[in-house]
Amino acid sequence: VNTLVNEMGVGAKEQALGISQVNEAVNDLDRVTQQNAALVEESADAAQAMSQNTGVLGRTLAVFRLR
């Protein structure tokens, strides 16, 4: 009986370690997902700014068109 109880204790410790590692991996994935979301927002803002600058540049260059 003692052997079985000891083996159960070892198994429980191994499970706890495995769960801890899975939890750590999930936290890492969550962190990376949040970073990616922030980068997507920054990219969208940059794309919008570039689009606006393209319009300004087009109107500026229109002044210099030769007929």
Image (spheres, rainbow, N blue to C red):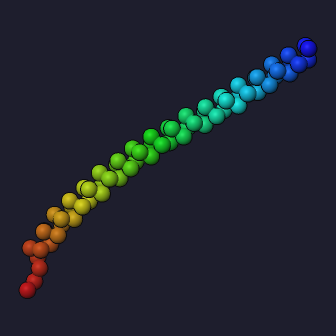
Which residue reaches farthest front? 1
Give percent across and percent down for residue 29: 54, 40
Q: Quadrant of the C terminus?
A: bottom left
Is residue 7 shown above or below 62? Answer: above
Residue in the foreground of this view, choosing between 9 and 32: 9
Is residue 60 shown above or below 3? Answer: below
Q: Quadrant of residue 11?
A: top right
Residue in the foreground of this view, choosing between 33 and 42: 33
Give percent across and percent down for residue 26: 57, 36
Residue in the foreground of this view, choosing between 3 and 14: 3
Marks counted in the figure total 0
Q: What residue do we see at 45% from left, 46% from top?
A: 36
Is residue 16 shown above or below 58? Answer: above
Give percent across and percent down for residue 62: 12, 74
Q: What residue do we see at 80% from left, 19% from top?
A: 9
Q: What residue do we see at 30% from left, 57% from top?
A: 47
Q: What residue do we see at 9% from left, 73% from top?
A: 63
Q: Is residue 9 left or right of residue 23?
A: right
Q: Quadrant of residue 7?
A: top right
Q: Is residue 5 left or right of residue 58?
A: right
Q: Quadrant of the N terminus?
A: top right
Is residue 27 shown above or below 58? Answer: above
Which residue reaches farthest top? 2
